[in-house]
């Protein structure tokens, strides 16, 4: 077993949580408090804002106690501490008290950088809490949340969760927790759609249904409404892909009762009936044409094109034409 270092130990004398992501900052605090209370259930926790830590306050909080109690002192927005209080903290960093863990939450910018540098020089345990401004970072966060909880989720499910919920890490973390609590086995895109996309998912499937039925005008109208109400373009390309693939699967399947085809193709019986209605105007090569259109649209909405809306409109029109190719 690897030897635990000060950087690994939440009970290090000083923990420095650096960044502006509130959820990660709170988790850094919770980790220290949990470790302290695991060592001593009676641990005293003092959680202070920068304006509550006045000159002399830290000395009072860290003075030796007759009862030698374990204590955690949390200082939020440490970059906003007054100059005199920063002097107190720097002095404390040079000789931290036993059985006391100081947690400094710092935004990480230029303000209060002297305190940040002093804490690092003193060997503080550091926890990075960066603001996740990029979609790729949030996607990585969701994947990590599933891993930490010991659960498997498909890449499509993770992406759908980010697309559905957005940039709030607390909501993303809560969604992952709910899914892992409610769902057994691997979490896939369909599960995420059922829980979180709601009306948005329904509207994306409306676009797909009208397109594979050859009703171009109605499909375009549904598309524009979906985009105007905030439906993520990636959800629409996903629905289009599912609609076209269903046509392809059923057109190449052997005839039979809906129940038998449902087992063979992995679709519910009601969907077999719907797809049978939708595929009446399709020719064999139409599915290939439509799938290429979906792939091009998918690339377009994921950064490969300048106008995601145009990419979707082009795909919808192409699919609708393919759906009518066998009607003469």
Image (cartoon, rainbow, N blue to C red):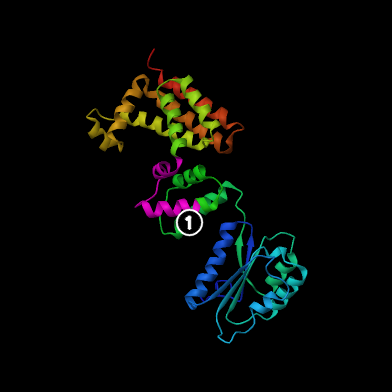
- Kindly identify the residue that appears in the image at 43 percent across and 32 percent down: 205
Using a 10 Å C-alpha cutoff, classify the residue at mark 1 as few (fewer than 14 neighbours), some (14 to 19) or many (20 or more).
some
Residue 142 located within the stretch drawn in magenta:
no
Q: Position of residue 319 (x, y in %)?
A: 45, 24
Q: Position of residue 234 (x, y in %)?
A: 50, 37
State which region is magenta.
Answer: 172-197
Displayed quadrant of residue 63: bottom right
Query: For residue 189: magenta?
Result: yes
Element on which disc 1 rests? helix
Can residue 242 be spotted in the picture?
Answer: yes
Residue at 55% from the left image edge and 82% from the top image edge: 69
Please tell me which residue is depicted at 54% across the width and 31% down the height of the picture: 227
Confirm whether residue 251 shows in the render: no
Number of labels in the image equals 1
Q: Which of the 4 image quadrants contains residue 44?
A: bottom right
The answer to which image quadrant residue 23 occupies is: bottom right
Q: Looking at the picture, how far across and down is residue 210, in whole percent?
A: 42, 24
Q: Is residue 163 left or right of residue 281?
A: right
Quarter of the figure that contains the C terminus: top left
Q: Which residue is mark 1?
A: 145
Closer-to-camera residue (167/60): 60
Query: Does residue 134 sit above or below 269 in this rendering?
Result: below
Is 125 situated left or right of 223 in this image?
right
Q: Is 8 on the left or on the right of 20, as rendered? A: left
Instruction: Characterize the magenta stretch by its predominant secondary structure.
Output: helix
Q: Position of residue 256 (x, y in %)?
A: 22, 29
Residue ranking furthest to the bottom: 66
């Amino acid at each position: 077993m690897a030897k635990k270092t000060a950087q690994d130990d939440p009970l290090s004398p000083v923990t420095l949580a650096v960044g502006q992501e509130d959820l990660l900052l709170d988790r850094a605090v919770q980790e220290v408090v949990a470790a302290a209370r695991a060592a001593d259930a009676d641990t005293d926790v003092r959680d202070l804002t920068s304006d509550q830590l006045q000159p002399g306050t830290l000395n009072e909080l860290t003075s030796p106690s007759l009862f030698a109690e374990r204590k955690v002192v949390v200082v939020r927005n440490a970059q906003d501490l007054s100059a005199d209080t920063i002097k107190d903290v720097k002095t404390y960093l040079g000789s931290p008290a036993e059985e006391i863990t100081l947690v400094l939450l710092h935004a990480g910018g230029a303000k209060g950088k002297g305190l940040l540098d002093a804490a690092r020089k003193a060997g503080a345990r550091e926890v990075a809490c960066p603001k996740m401004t990029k979609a790729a970072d949030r996607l990585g966060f969701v994947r990590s949340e599933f891993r930490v909880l010991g659960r498997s989720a498909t890449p499509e499910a993770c992406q759908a969760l980010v697309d559905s919920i957005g940039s709030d890490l607390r909501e993303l973390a809560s969604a992952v927790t709910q899914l892992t609590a409610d769902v057994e086995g691997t979490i896939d895109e369909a599960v995420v759609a059922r829980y979180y996309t709601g009306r948005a998912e329904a509207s994306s499937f409306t676009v797909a249904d009208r397109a594979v039925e050859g009703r171009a005008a109605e499909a375009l109208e549904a598309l524009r409404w979906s985009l105007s109400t905030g439906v993520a373009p990636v959800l629409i390309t996903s629905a289009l892909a599912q609609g076209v693939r269903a046509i392809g699967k059923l057109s190449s399947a052997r005839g039979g009762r809906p129940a038998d085809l449902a087992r063979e193709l992995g679709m519910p019986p009601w969907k077999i009936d719907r797809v049978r209605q939708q595929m009446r105007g399709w020719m064999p090569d139409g599915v290939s044409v439509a799938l290429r259109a979906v792939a091009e649209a998918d690339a377009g909405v994921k950064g490969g094109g300048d106008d995601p809306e145009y990419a979707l409109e082009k795909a919808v029109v192409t699919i609708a034409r393919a759906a009518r190719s066998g009607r003469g």
